Image (spheres, rainbow, N blue to C red):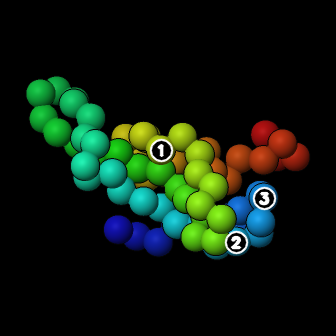
Amino acid sequence: MAKHELKQCPFCGGEAEVITHKFFPTMSNGRETESYGVVCKNCNTSGYQFYDCVQYAVNAWNRRVDNG
């Protein structure tokens, strides 16, 4: 998986990482696919964790009130 640029955690300023949910696959066209989310490595804050695309998870995490 390519490294994606993630903003720091909005609560503690810690480093975040993309996580893959292999244990909770979604069904798409009759086949299993992985889900993705982002979590802070320091305080374990996370956003919505079940995006079907890494970039959607990254975009959601990076969204802040000041930048829409």
Please, what secondary structure does the residue beneath circle 2 have?
loop
Kind of residue at badge 3: Phe
Q: Which residue is mark 3?
A: 11
- Which residue extends farthest front? 43
**Front in this rendered view, residue 17 or 5:** 17
- Which residue extends farthest top? 29
Packing grade of label 3 (10 A; few <14, some 14-19, many >=20) is few
Kind of residue at badge 1: Gln
Dividing the picture into quadrants, the one containing residue 1 is bottom left
Residue at image position (36%, 56%) is 20
Packing grade of label 2 (10 A; few <14, some 14-19, many >=20) is some
Q: Which residue is mark 1?
A: 49
Q: Residue 14 — which label? A: 2
Q: In 3D space, how far apart are the residues under numbered discs 1 and 2 (Cα atoms)?
A: 18 Å
Residue at image position (78%, 58%) is 11
**Front in this rendered view, residue 13 or 29:** 13
